[in-house]
Amino acid sequence: MEKKFKSGFVSIVGRPNVGKSTLINRFLGEKISIISSKPQTTRNSIRTILTNDEYQIVFIDTPGIHKPKHKLGEYMVKSATESLRGVDVVVMLLDCTEEIGTGDRYIMDIVKEAQCPVFLALNKIDKLPKQKLEEVLAKISEYESIFTSIIPISAAEGNNTDILLNEMVKNLPEGPLYFPSDMVTDVPEKFIVAETIREKILELTTDEIPHGTAVEITSMKERQNKDMMDIEATIYCEKDSHKAIIIGKQGNMLKEIGTRARVDIETLLNCKINLQLWVKVKKNWRDTMTDLKTLGYK
């Protein structure tokens, strides 16, 4: 008897910095979503696609659900909560190295209204002694009724992620191939290039600077008869003092951002890259609707 093909949409939700992007990159076996130790790294709901002969899963990597402080924050939270509509499976990610807080309970109140199976993945078990994990599981027991299953995992190390994946596939309906089998994301190359540059800013700068930055790709052109692409990008920040830090002494910080970004972009696009970066101040862009739309937060 021929095995039925399964397909569907899986939304990954949780507080900022619980490992949502790391988990999706683990499933895909390659880096699509940017990763940082800083919270609120993901700003858009990004769709990534995992396909084999038996199934196709369209993952929706959402911004961390948090109390917004500006219009960008409101956009991010709305984007995350709207991702629960019309999906086939929801996975809530919880950082089991931290206490369950009001933010986690708020998300549980949201996901319990989902009209589909909801899994709770207790992430970062690689950083927790076995006895502590048992204590976390005991505390979670009062919320068990919300979830189809509770699975301890490590997105970074891959512990039990295969179990979580198998459970998701079991709960997918039979369906069509929504995207071509060789497609891994539905976002344009420009978006991933901009996110890669922003990731390097997150890696190299501190405090409030990373969250006040955005990246716009102003030009991407392939050189004729050469395996090379010219990319021009503008980094926007909110203050003159931030601009000075991003550029750095004698331009050293900006050069390092560009060097690190170029390595990842060359891997992504499979060609040599000539990357030119500029830094401009755009005050209060996170609270200005026209700026948000221009920078892709629609």
Image (tube, rainbow, N blue to C red):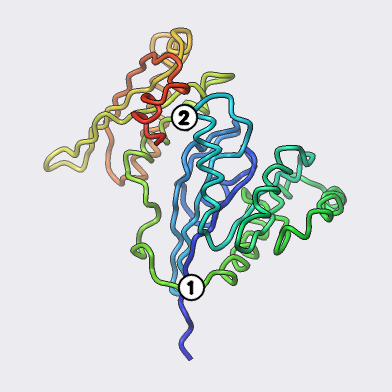
Q: Residue pushed farthest left?
A: 225
In which quadrant is the C terminus drawn? top left
Residue at which label 2 appears: 200
- Residue 196 lies left or right of residue 126; in this view the side is left
Relative height, residue 286 to residue 48 (above, below): above
Lateral position of residue 284 relative to residue 93, left or right: left
Picture quadrant of residue 263 = top left
In which quarter of the view is residue 252 placed?
Answer: top left
Horizontal and vertical percent for residue 5?
A: 46, 76
Q: Please determine whether, in this image, residue 125 is positioned above or below residue 149.
A: above
- Mark 1 falls on what kind of element? strand
Residue 253 visible in the current orientation: no
Q: Residue at x 48, y 65 (%)?
A: 8
Q: At 59% across and 65% down in the image, what residue appears?
A: 168
Residue type indicated by callout 2: Lys
Badge 1 density bin: few <14, some 14–19, many ≥20, Cα 10 Å: some
Which of the numbered marks, if any, corresponds to residue 74? none
Any part of residue 207 in sight? yes
Give neighbour class at mark 2: few <14, some 14-19, many 20+ (Cα, 10 Å): many
Tell me the distance, in whole angstroms, between the alpha carbons under discs 2 and 1: 37 Å
Q: Secondary structure at mark 2?
A: helix
Q: Which residue is nearer to you in this view: 189 or 267?
A: 189
Residue beneath label 1, please? 6
- Between disc 2 and disc 1, the foreground one is 1
Residue at x 24%, y 31% (from the top left corner): 219
| Left or right relative to 144: residue 44 | left
Q: Amino acid at mark 1?
A: Lys
Q: Position of residue 257 (x, y in %)?
A: 42, 25
Q: Position of residue 297 (x, y in %)?
A: 41, 34
